[in-house]
Image (spheres, rainbow, N blue to C red):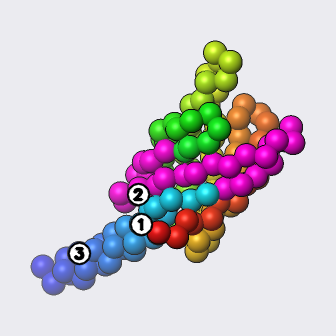
Amino acid sequence: MTRIRPLVCIAAVLSFVVVASAAAVDGKWKAEFETPDGQTRTNTFTFKAEGEKLTGSVTGQAGEAPIQNGKVSGDGISFSVVRNFGGQEVTIQYKGKISGDTIQFTVDFGGGGFEITAKRIAT
């Protein structure tokens, strides 16, 4: 019985660390960037993490779209968004690394990709 108590304490601390690090992404983030074809865009990300599960939305020129398959693990973040361009659905993959109030993303949309940086919006 005495061996189980330390293991339970360690598990509780580790689960708190995971939740605390995931919660660091909650809120609104803004990225101003240039697309590979030279157009300037702004996206606003709204994130909510519950453990490793990430929900929220991405808002940009094409409107608002819900995050799908969202995950936060340590300082890593990943999700996808489905957009409709000219009647064709395109899945955009986002993978990034959180560092304080900045997220460095790699954005991939079917083989073509680019880098963007999102910054936390102060509320």
Image point 35% across, 57% down: which residue? 50
- 64 displayed left or right of 87: left
Question: Comparing marks 3 and 2, which lies closer to the viewer?
Answer: 2
Image point 41% across, 56% down: which residue? 48
Q: Is residue 75 visible?
A: no
Quarter assignment of residue 80: top right
Q: Which residue bears the numbered disc 3?
A: 8
The amino acid type, in three-letter code, at marker 1 is Ala
Q: Position of residue 47 (x, y in %)?
A: 46, 55
Q: Residues within 10 Å of mark 2 (few under 14, many from 20)?
A: many
The amino acid type, in three-letter code, at marker 3 is Val
Is the Cβ of the residue at disc 3 closer than 8 Å to that at disc 2?
no
- 1 displayed left or right of 65: left
Q: Earlier in the sequence, mark 2 or mark 1?
A: 1
Image point 62% across, 33% down: which residue? 62
* Residue bounds of the magenta highlight: 31-57
Q: For the stretch drawn in magenta, what is the main secondary structure?
A: strand
Q: Which residue bears the numbered disc 2?
A: 49
Mark 2 lies on a secondary structure that is: strand
